Amino acid sequence: MRKTTRVALLVLVLTLVFGAGQAFAATESKLESTVDPLLGIKYRYGGSTTKGFDCSGFVQYVFGKLGIDLPRSSRDQFQVGEKVSKDELRVGDLVFFNTSGKGVSHVGIYMGDGRFVHSSTSKGVTYTSMSDKYYANRYVGARRILDDEAYHLLAIAVEKAESEAEADGAQAEGTDAETEAWDAEEETAWDMEGVEIENPESDQDGVQG
């Protein structure tokens, strides 16, 4: 079976198992959980770590956390993936802007609800509306890095992580319950020390008629 056929079958199976909506929701959740801790990190030219990000360094970092390698510069990132129109944007698409007057010079990640997240020179990592006048006038285009297959693979990863977390929580609760039961037994044992238990049969033997 050719690789393209196997991939197509994989996507079909994943769609049947998870459903497109669930896969997209899982990916959105994963992106948000990756991005949210980074909000407010300052802008740093050439930065690609949590000590400071430039725009393409931030995008590269976030997608690296999802297991996806991207080029370092916004211009090179603009050559990756599939071109997508502005009215078809979905969570995870890269959005590009010409802020220098010389072509693509800024990039962010579309997060849904008409917003994208990026590393701004003035605000650091932040959310901005796609309708913001400054960026709307400098919008160049978008690229889709997360195709349907990637969405579903991420959905599996999220589902697995959530299942493992639930299992760990259940195990911890079980351990706590066992500990509480053991503590209760020990307390009972301590309370019973030095207490004489009356023997009904002995009392009956001592009764005189």
Image (spheres, rainbow, N blue to C red):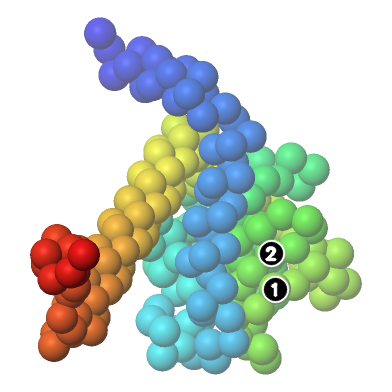
The amino acid at mark 2 is: Phe
Q: Which residue is mark 2?
A: 116
Determine if residue 147 is in view: no
- Where is residue 109 shown, x and y percent of the image? 60, 61
Determine if residue 142 is in view: yes
Residue 138 sits in which quadrant?
bottom right
Q: Nearer the viewer, residue 82 or 176?
A: 176
Q: Is residue 187 left or right of residue 194?
A: right
Q: Residues within 10 Å of mark 2 (few under 14, many from 20)?
A: many
Q: Tell me which numbered mark, 1 or 2, is placed earlier along the sequence.
A: 2
Q: Residues within 10 Å of mark 1 (few under 14, many from 20)?
A: some
Q: Nearer the viewer, residue 45 or 24?
A: 24
Residue 118 sits in which quadrant?
bottom right
Q: Nearer the viewer, residue 117 or 160?
A: 160
Q: Which residue is mark 1?
A: 127
Q: What label does residue 48 carry, if any?
A: none
- Where is residue 157 shown, x and y percent of the image? 38, 45
Gap between marks 1 and 2 measured at Cα: 6 Å
Which quadrant would the N terminus be assigned to in this image? top left
- The residue sitting at 65% across, 78% down in the picture is 126
**In the orientation shown, which residue stands out farthest toward the top?**
1
- Where is residue 96 shown, x and y percent of the image? 64, 61
Q: Is residue 53 left or right of residue 103?
A: left
